[in-house]
Image: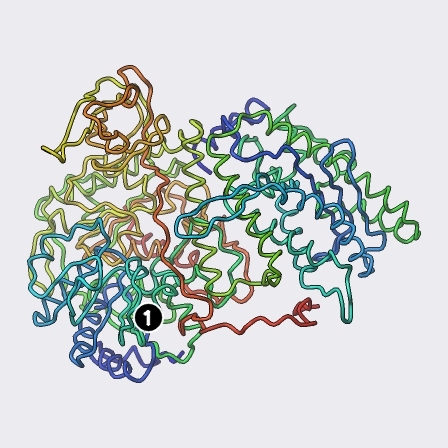
Amino acid sequence: MSLLTSLARLRALHEGVAQPIATVRHCHLSRRPMVFIPLKLSGEAAAPLAAMLGTDRDRPRLLVVTQPRNRDQRFAWAAELAGVLLPYVESFLADTETVERRNADPYERALDAPQLVVPNLGAVAFTRLLGRSTRFRRTDGPYPVPEEVPLLGRWLTYLGERASYPGSSLMPAATEELGRHWATGQSGLEDANLAALLHWITDGPTDDAEDPLIWPPAGPATDPGFDAEVLAPAIDSGSPERVTEALRTQLEPTWRLMWRAIDLLAGLPEGASVAQRWEQDRASFSGMAAAIAEGGPPQPRRDGAVAAAARLARMERAQAAYDVQRAYDDPLVMAEFRLTGEAFAGEVVETDPGHTEGEGRSRKLRPLVVVKTDDPVRLPAGTALGTPQRRGQGAELVSAAGGLVTVKITKGMGRGRTPAPGAVPEVGERVCYTSLTDDFQGSPALPESESTPWTHGGPPQEYVPNDDDAQEEWS
Amino acid sequence: MTVQQDADTRSPEQVIADVLADLPRHRGVVVDSPPGAGKSTLVVRAAAHIAATGEPLMIVAQTNEQVDDLVTRICDKHPRLTVGRLSAGGYVPPRRLLDLPGVTVGARVQDLGDPDIVIATADKWAWISGRVWPWAIVDEAYQMRSDKLLRIAGLFERALFVGDPGQLDPFSIVDGDRWSGLSWDPLQSAVSVLLRHNPDLPVHRLPVSWRLPASAAPVVSRAFYPFTGFRSGTGPDDRRLELATQGMGTVHDRALEEAARSGWALLELPNRHTVRTDGEAVQAVALLAARLLQRGAVAYSEQGERPVSADRIAVGAAHRDQVAAIRNAGLPPEITVDTANRLQGREYDVTIVLHPLSGRRDATAFHLESGRLCVLASRHRHACVVVARAGIAELLDAHPSAEPVQLGVPVKFPDGWEANQSVLEHLAAHRV
């Protein structure tokens, strides 16, 4: 936890209400999000019990497995889920735009993409498990499942994996997104309780959030008291209606909380880089849809050597870009870097807009700007700098001493002899410069999977689908 | 893997002979080297040995400094070898490199002519393709992530992997739990992945540290290499550190005197929870460095007598902001101040260390990583002064390692928690 977040948490505790740690929203919010609250049977890894989902806050759909130990009912439930989820996902495939690429064929990118909002990270993990237990199933052979179940599994897997991709908004977890924008006076573990977190943000902390009779857990695990006293007798009674109504009492409160969380996030203005990250989400979504349309195999259970390295490279790049973009979008996030000496903000006290370097044809415009700052500047001379005020520009630190920092603008000045109006900050303007930049070099090529080298176990065996695919080592 | 069990009794010469003999017999050979055990010497010897067969050789190191060091060493020992140094576009070769005969610098393999040895960082090698070298030497292989090895493994047929298993593991800014337990986990070191897929490769171990003095080798060996110990190449009387002027009796002076006498000192500040850039601790570190210079320390060793000048002193810390704060405290610029990550592979006469757990409220996996303390405690030829707030032992007791156990991940030794306790226990005897 950074110093500033610690301070915000202390202040939240002192004032009895959560403190904002972001001035803009760093995640995309869909105009038509689907809220998805899954519940599982306690004591089982991936036995679904119920799910409440839908795009309309007034009309949630409740899907229930009335006898969760019956595997046929589980897959019938999965088919029902597919009946709601797949039309939603596929509704985004129709409208696309053509994107030109350098050194590659143009491709079709969806104009909008699905957004599955879940309560917490537990729900993300459970979604991944649901995907794993359904995507390898066969619609023929010994234990056939309804036709749409394997396809549902592939989409759930895709969304669950995308959730761990830094900066993606295809499957946000409410507690995570709220926690990125507000600091409460409770521990990180307690923040994972959606009811407690929301109360801190809206009306201040309440003991009710811990009471499962008032606010049942947001899942995927259910309250043990409910399991023993309500659910077990209902299942034993053999009445599907009784089970359904019992589970509705557990899901409805969370359903209301989820929409409140969405409203809270919607109240924040969107960060400047959010659209760019959503564009990547849309591209990734279209790529997945194309892979399915081409009849590719389901996602493997584990990454091979080459796939793992490729995914790691993509994720690291996304994480670095996400961190930098949030700082550029949001002065409160940038403040963290100002505290550690990687950024500084202050007032321009002197400029030399006509400063040049080089002679004759290689003469270049390199304006100088002197900034007066109270921040601790811990950057050596020569550091490349960027600024949120003028994103296209690059600069270089010339010297820093006694609260005065001299900066030389090195990129984005054009070819003219004098700077364009507004290109160089005026005396008196407040500016911020930072050593964070998001121009990353591409990563070098990886070998093809078929030519995995001897150091990494050699080429893997080719995948041939068979009836045992859905078998887990322990099942 | 076949670990040479009798390494304790073998001389370094014998081990090197064994390594060279194993090279043609196996696809890969691994050499574990504790701090200062002559790893670079081995790399230079092996390079010359392979080059003598007339077959081309590629060398992989991890940083540009390491590459430049190796080029200098190879040319120094074997002036007749031709060396090509591959570099990225923005790299400016240091003066000393350009003056060497037989060295060419270029961004493409074609620009180098046809040298006996081509050397570059792992990052640079990842961009090279279209040629296969019969031999490779991978230096600092434990600091190299296995996904980097994956990118370059197609460039060579056989390889010698050299590195120090006790130093910092490679890391990532993203959570890599999804791959843990896989034999090709991209976040594991190149050597771990190599050995998991090729368990029959021979693993040799250099048995003697030439850098660490007799006062430090047993401490570091016990704490960080519990099952593969090493010994010091020098005896207790071979190294001496003397301070030319009398002290003034301050704690800083007494700490320096203790370090000169015994090789270790712990300057303990009052127990307090502080921010990372703890002002008092930073001040203490800067004062120690300044006093060490003022008092004119002289180091006597098997290499003769020399004054401990500013460039022979290093200051180490865990975080970059701590490093920046210490640098801003007004140290002479010749003194190296850096994080553990960047001090890896370096050597100084005296080191001053800001303890990673000093003033902390919690002990996270980052701070408990044994390699971090190992690097900081094993850079010196003569003495190491540690600055820490009191209460680290209690902090450790309150934070036993509680990382989740992952299936299929080989147990790693040493345990960071235990190593920290072991070092702390030793330092307690040298507290000022």
Rendered location of residue A5, percent (x, y):
48, 32
Residue nearest the observer in this picture, B282 or B37: B37
Question: Mark 1: few, some, or many residues within 10 Å (few <14, many ≥20)?
Answer: many
Left or right, residue A31 beside residue B153: right
| Point 55% across, 24% down: residue | A14
Give the vertical position of A11 relative to A174 (above or below).
above
Display colour scheme: rainbow
The quarter holding residue B330 reads top left
Left or right, residue B108 beside residue B275: left
Give the vertical position of B356 relative to A207 (above or below).
below
Question: Numbered disc 1: what chain?
Answer: B
Rendered location of residue A225, percent (x, y):
80, 45
Give the vertical position of A411 relative to B404 (above or below).
above
Residue nearest the observer in this picture, A195 or A471: A471
> Which amino acid type is shown beneath numbered disc 1?
Gly
Q: Residue furthest top?
A: A428
Residue nearest the observer in this picture, A180 or A308: A308
| Point 14% across, 36% down: residue | A362
Give the vertical position of B104 relative to A24 (above or below).
below
Left or right, residue A46 beside residue B225: right
Rendered location of residue B131, percent (x, y):
28, 70
Helix, strand, or loop for circle 1? loop
Left or right, residue B209 beside residue B297: right
Residue holding disc 1: B229
Image quadrant in which the N terminus of chain B is located? bottom left
Rendered location of residue B415, percent (x, y):
44, 60
**Total of numbered circles in the picture?**
1
